[in-house]
Image (cartoon, grey):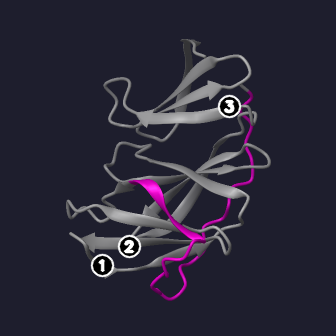
Amino acid sequence: MSLTPAAAPTPTPAPTPTRASATPAVSVISPVADFNGDHHSDLLWRNSQSGDVAIWLLDGTSVIQTPVIVNVPLNWKIIGLADLNGDGHHELIWRNQSTGAVTAWYLTNFNPTSGVNLGTPALNWRLRGIGKFNANPSDAFVWHDSNTGTIAIWNFNSAGQFSSSFPGTAP
C-alpha cells in the first residue's frame, strides 16, 4: 500500500449556522456520534450537491444547535468518524475519490481546527471498518484491497500517527 502525503481539504471558518433542509441531496453520514459529550447521539449531514457539511446537536429528538461547519469540494467524501488520538472526540475522516488521499479533521467546538494528511492508498483499497484492535485508546482503520484481498490495519497512537499491519487476506 503506497502512503504518500496528499493535499487535504483545508478547514475554513464556519459560516453563520443555518438549519439544513431534508432534501434528497442531503444525507446523514453514518454512524451517528455524540459530538458535544452530552450522551445524546448527534447527526452529521452532507449535502451531495453543494458539499456543505453540518452537525445537528440533539437532545433526544430535539435539535438544540445546527452549526454549518464548512463547504468541501464534492470529490472529498466522509468515510468515517474516528478517535485517532484517544481523547474521546471524533475526527472526521475524508477520502478524495479521485486521488485516494485520506485526511482527518480535528474538531473544536464543531469547527475543523486542523487537517492531517494520513496517506494516499491506491483507489482499490477500501476502508471497511473502524474500531479498536489493541489496548490503545485510539481507533484503528481496517482496509481491504479489492484486487488482492489483502487486509491492512492502521493502528493509531495518541499522537495520531499510525503503524500498519497486514494480518492476512479475505475475499
User: Which quadrant holds the N terminus?
Assistant: top right
Residue pointed to by mark 2: 56
Element on which disc 3 rests? strand
CB atoms at circles 2 and 1 under 8 Å apart?
Answer: yes
- Cα separation between marks 2 and 3: 31 Å
The numbered dot on residue 114 is none
Residue at (53, 33) in percent of width and height: 128
Amino acid type indicated by mark 3: Trp
Residue 68 is situated, as x and y percent measured from the top left of the image, at: 50, 78
* First reached walking from the N terminus: tag 2 or tag 3: 2
For disc 3, the marked residue is 125
- Mark 2 packing: few (<14 Cα in 10 Å), some, or many (20+)? many
What residue is at 29 percent from the left and 65 percent from the top? 36
Q: Secondary structure at mark 1?
A: strand
The amino acid marked with disc number 1 is: Val
Mark 1 sits on what residue?
A: 63
State how far apart marks 3 and 1 are (Cα): 37 Å
Counting other residues with Cα less than 10 Å from the Cα at mark 3, is it few (<14), some (14-19), or many (20 or more)?
Answer: many
Residue at 64% in and 67% down: 48
Q: Which residues are magenta?
A: 2-31
Q: Residue at x 58, y 29 (%)?
A: 143
